[in-house]
Image (spheres, grey):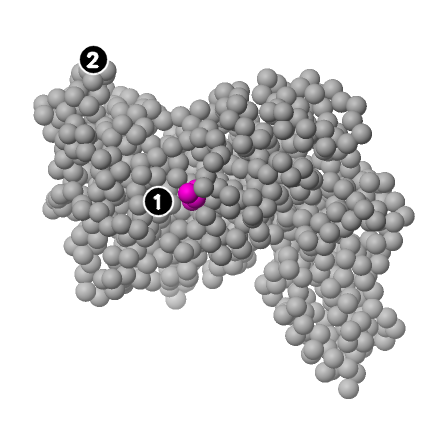
Amino acid sequence: MRTAVKVAVRGRVQGVGFRPFVFGLADTYLLNGTVQNNMDGVKIYLEGESMAIQQFLSDLKNKAPRLSKINEILAQETELVGVNDFRIIPSERSGTSMLVIPIDSAVCDECLNEMNDPEDFRYQYPVINCTQCGPRYTIIEELPYDRPFTSMKLFPMCEDCRREYDDPTNRRHHAQPIACPKCGPKVWLLDQNGHEQFSVSPIKDSIKLLKQGKIVAIKGIGGYHLACDARNQEAVMALRSRKRRPNRPLAVMAASITAAREFAEISVMEKELVTSPESPILVLKKNKQYQLPEGVAPGMGTIGVMLPYSPLHHLLFADQELTCLVMTSANPSGMPILYKDEEAFQYLDGIADYYLVHNREILHPVDDSVVQINDGEIDFLRRSRGYVPDPFSTIVDVSGIVAFGGQQKTTFTIGRNEQIFVGPHIGDLENIVTTQHYQQELEHLLKWIDTPKSVAVIDAHPGYHVQKLVKEYEFKEVLEVQHHHAHMAAVLDEHHIEGKAFGIILDGTGYGLDENIWGFEIFYGDCAEFDRLAHLKYTPLPGSEKCIREPWRNAAAMLISLHAEKGLQLAKAIFTEKALEIEILKRMIENNINTIQAGTCGRLFDAVSALCGVTKVSSYDGEAAIHLAELVDENLIYKPYPFNLLEKDILTIDFSRMIEDIALDVLAGNNTANISGRFHETVVQAIVSTMEHVYRDGTNRDVVLSGGSIHNRYLRKRISHELRGRNFNVYFSKKVPCNDGGLSYGQLVVAAAKRSVKECVLEYQRK
């Protein structure tokens, strides 16, 4: 029986070879009709035998291209029109947008094979791509995703590319970035002044320069990297010196999995992740054969590793002597990633020796994503290239809600219907350049996603820049959300936990409802509201932000506040060269001069790190805590220090005895790694004891863990193991970072939940 159907496909179905795939399926099942991109996804009209259409719909769902992600297929019978063939027709740009913006993807094996084939006309072409790989989000100007609305519009196709582009059976049919050496973007080598170097092969000459120890700025898919030979200690240290990055680990790009295994341990799960189309930086454990210079990841037992993900990267490893490159974002400290050529020449003056550039304009910069495997699960440290702006599905209507995030590791999040779009990693909103970058990307996504500006959500901290930024936009309502409630809600929503749950939040800084700094909390609640059941005892931060930059100050203040004169003497005994400053800190605390009260896991880690002599002064955010955690063997269980739970208005975790014992152990010369391990286990046992204390019969046994300290491998593993052993159900973020990179996502779902409650109340009142 011959019939006709209209099919609507929603999800990630543009820029991924979906229309050629549909064309091939229609040919296989002898169906006539059309396929078209539109602002709602992909529209298909089919005529043919009923059984063939059913087989088509089954394959449409189960055999879709590797980069596609189908969220919904709607099929509806319609009248026969009587078409004689199957055609791909021009995109329709009208209507309400429901599009999922395509993500950037690592080069595929088919393209690599062509690039390495001397007989292929794209042999060694550094910007080769097809429908299954290459740039997407970074080159889009307008939607829907068609070549005239991308930065590729400046490159008219040659006859060969046009033939492939128009051929529905070809892998490059409607591949919008399609190009070849004849018609596509070119690559140049420039000197440190931005002058083009005469070069028959810019890439081969760049390889020679890298082998000579030079620092080369390389323009990639989402922005500029600074590269040098990772096996050359002098080059690595020169890069550190020029970039003013003394201690923070540098990411490396290994030529292959085999090359990476020369210095890192890689499990089966880790191999799948690092070789995926998303191709993130993966934090791996150094192996016993590790021989890279100490300057790559100083004092660390781990190293960030990625594989070549663009064809240009692969060509840089053509010389077998070059097996590993430092490949770090070229942005100056505190600034967004560089992606415009003129800005790169300006900001990298005196840093890069040479520039390897191409003339395909980057419209939307994205940093590399950073992930780790933590207790057998994916743990995002930074979610950006390869993942952004792919939406998440939720179970509530989030239309019109825009969450602005926080101050550090900032992202924004936009809601549309039951889709949540988390924007790219922006960085820290500490300067006008980063703020302008934030606004540029926010405004583009607001335009593309096409959702009303109903509710803006911001962090409750009065000093965060988003408090001023939101005033530049016209929203009907502005909602402030407590920092750690947002962290908790992100996990609740991801796992669709609708009832109340416990939230264990271990974090660095979050403005509290009592105007103190929170960051070591146990909540009970849901996405709409929470009760604070327990927290860490407050200690002073004299000098506020200076205590964060110089953890020894925090440690001394903690000793003084918890142990008075005895603490003062312990502080002077440990920080012998700071005796005069310690006296000043004491007076600041006594007179409450420029001093705030804080009870945060991040500051606790900072203090212990400084006491142990691991990190007394931080050169980057989280350094003290990271280096302290690196000393711990996550496969051991350490003996905890003593601690107390104080019954006050709210249960208070008191680590006074632990801090004193750690100070005495340090002065006694005890093993630093063991001190760190015991400290970690004390935090674990304090959390578990507190949970046993606050749990009441009848309350939910679901527990969510979030906050930046939950990236700590030992804490995550031990807390979850101990709680599960006591019949609690434990959940973590797997889709967004548990640090502030996931904050905007949590803010949005809090706003949605509060709106839902408000609507329910209004409905009840009407009745």
Identify the residue at horizontal 68%, vertical 53% (top origin).
109
Residue 437 horizontal/vertical position (percent): 57, 32
Closer to the camera in the image, 653 or 713: 713
Task: Determine the residue positioned at 35% across, 35% down.
Answer: 627
Horizontal relation, residue 256 to residue 552: left or right: right
- Quadrant placement of the N terminus: bottom right
> Residue at point 26% right, 58% down?
723
C-alpha separation, residue under disc 1 versus residue under disc 2? 35 Å
Q: Position of residue 513 (x, y in %)?
A: 28, 40
- Where residue 579 sits, quadrant-wise, is top left
Residue range highlighted in magenta = 284-288
Which element is circle 1 on?
loop
Q: What residue does disc 2 label?
A: 580
Q: Position of residue 295 (x, y in %)?
A: 46, 28
Closer to the chain start, of discs 1 and 2, is 2
How packed mark 1 is, by other alpha carbons closer than 10 Å (few <14, some 14-19, many 20 or more), is some
Check the image and report above or below for 582 versus 386.
Answer: above
Tag 2: amino acid = Leu
Q: Is residue 741 visible?
A: no
Residue that protrudes farthest toward the left in the picture: 565
- Is residue 735 on the magenta stretch? no
Instruction: From the viewer's side, name the closer residue of 632 and 476.
Output: 632
Disc 2, SS: helix
Q: Which residue is mark 1?
A: 712
Q: Main secondary structure of the magenta part?
A: loop
